Image: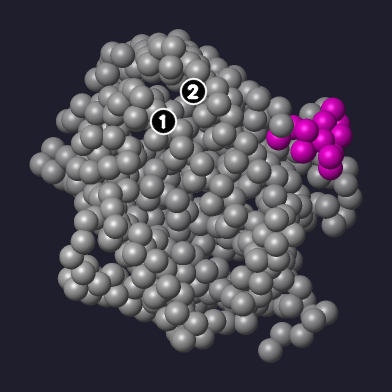
Amino acid sequence: MTLPGTPNYTDSRTLARGAAVNFLGMLARASRILLTLFVTRVSGAHVYGLFVLATAVADIASRISIFGMDKSLLVFIPKTAERDASESRRVLSASFRIALLLGGVASAVLFCAGPSIGAGLLDEPALGPPLRIIALSILPFTFLTLFLSATKALKIMSYDALVSGLVFPLLLLLCATPIIWIDRDVVWLTAAYAITTVVAAGIALLFFARHWSVMQSFIASTKRTLRPMVRFSTPLALHDGVQLLGARLELFILAFFVGPAEIGIYAVAVELATVIRQTLDPILIPLVAGPESEADKPRVEAHLSRAVRWILIVGSIYVAAVLLFGEPLLEIFGPGFSRGVTALIVLATAHAVNAAMSLVDSAMMASGRPHVNLLNALAFLGVHIGLSLYLVPRYGIVGAAVSVLASVLILAAVRVGQSLLVLKLNPFSASQLKPIVAALAAVIAVVTLKSLVSVQQYVLLPLLLVTFALTAILVLRLLGLEEEDRDLIARVLNRVRLRT
């Protein structure tokens, strides 16, 4: 048992606080679905599909301009802050200068080449004007990411949860709503996105300024920090770029074989599936990046195993819920969207597995082996390309989803092997089976109830939802929650009580 006042107890409570804030932030990110729902109901799957393709291109360009500096800040700032605050400013200055240079170049290239990318590479001539508009969001989005990453390096997770999870999607919704009512063209939707990015970056800058001098963070000397940061960030940038390309790849391949409407349906499935993305990754890196991490393997292993368990609790129950209620959920977005239910189930499973196993990447990076993550990402991309080119022409959006799941499972097996053999860390424990058992029990309970009760769907659905939730909670309680799980739940409930 870990006692108060000991390092392990402090780390556990820090991890619990970070997990709670990030979990709330993940729930807040669900507000993005409101925008998706509005666009699909008002403009249809076709416009939403074009918008998703445009933002996917912008995401890749932004990731290039960030150049892995967001993760570098999570490692360098905790180390330099212990010695001298001026060193942290030099770290920030190096990252900002690189981002300014690369972001400016990426914006100019996308603005000039937008029509060629739309008509040539993606076979969608209508994407030209939206790509030119969305190019204006690259530089603001880059600094938005870096400002929030700098505050996360101080283990302040609330800013990211507020800006990325709540403010950004709500601002986009408020900005897009009047524009879409006036003109349902994708050009105006991308304009709303660019405006929102600028405003959100300004808000992130205000939070950043609470802890650092903005001017000093831009003009501080980078003589001793630029080269080490570039050396550290280069494999991270390559890894992030390859990883993001792998995540967006099926969208670009789908553009050649199906129309924008099918892409819109698939994008909604992706949006719903990624609700369960990892909540502990940002807070885990600073904890395992400390100088004592290599010498204290049991502590790092405990963090890793605990984080995997918490993600499995969310992921297992969510996948089970999608399996049972995915079709009526998709019908909310408009006629025809229920065609994506199979893709949704497959994608939800893939993202649950990836969310849990990607924590090994964080531990690998913090141990000073970012090149391993790059090799993993390259292998994933190669497998994903091959499977997508084979499955998408034959099975459309279902083939794209199966390609994602198969690639993720292969990568997960590789990550587990690397964790055991390279890091000497075991990410698994017997307690991680509990959420899986609870999810299976909830599925069985709902299926049984559906077979016994014969009433209209709108009456039965609420009853099934209540049965699912109560069964999952009851089984988890019967199996017994770990001490850290009880502490996390108590903290979240206390936050809710204080705010209400």
x and y percentages locating residue 385 in the rendered image: 26, 43
Q: What type of secondary structure mainly makes up the magenta span? A: helix
Whether residue 333 sits left or right of residue 77 in the image: it is left
Q: Quadrant of residue 408?
A: bottom left
- Look at the image and tell me whether residue 113 can be seen: no
**Cα distance between the residues tagged 2 and 1:** 8 Å
Q: Residues within 10 Å of mark 2 (few under 14, many from 20)?
A: some
In the image, the segment drawn in magenta is: 204-216
Determine which residue is flagged by label 2. Answer: 177
Secondary structure beneath dot 1 equals helix
CB within 8 Å, label 2 to label 1: yes
Amino acid type at mark 2: Thr
Amino acid type at mark 1: Phe
x and y percentages locating residue 388 in the rendered image: 22, 43
Say which mark, if any, is on residue 38: 1
Count of numbered tags: 2
Q: Quadrant of residue 269?
A: top left
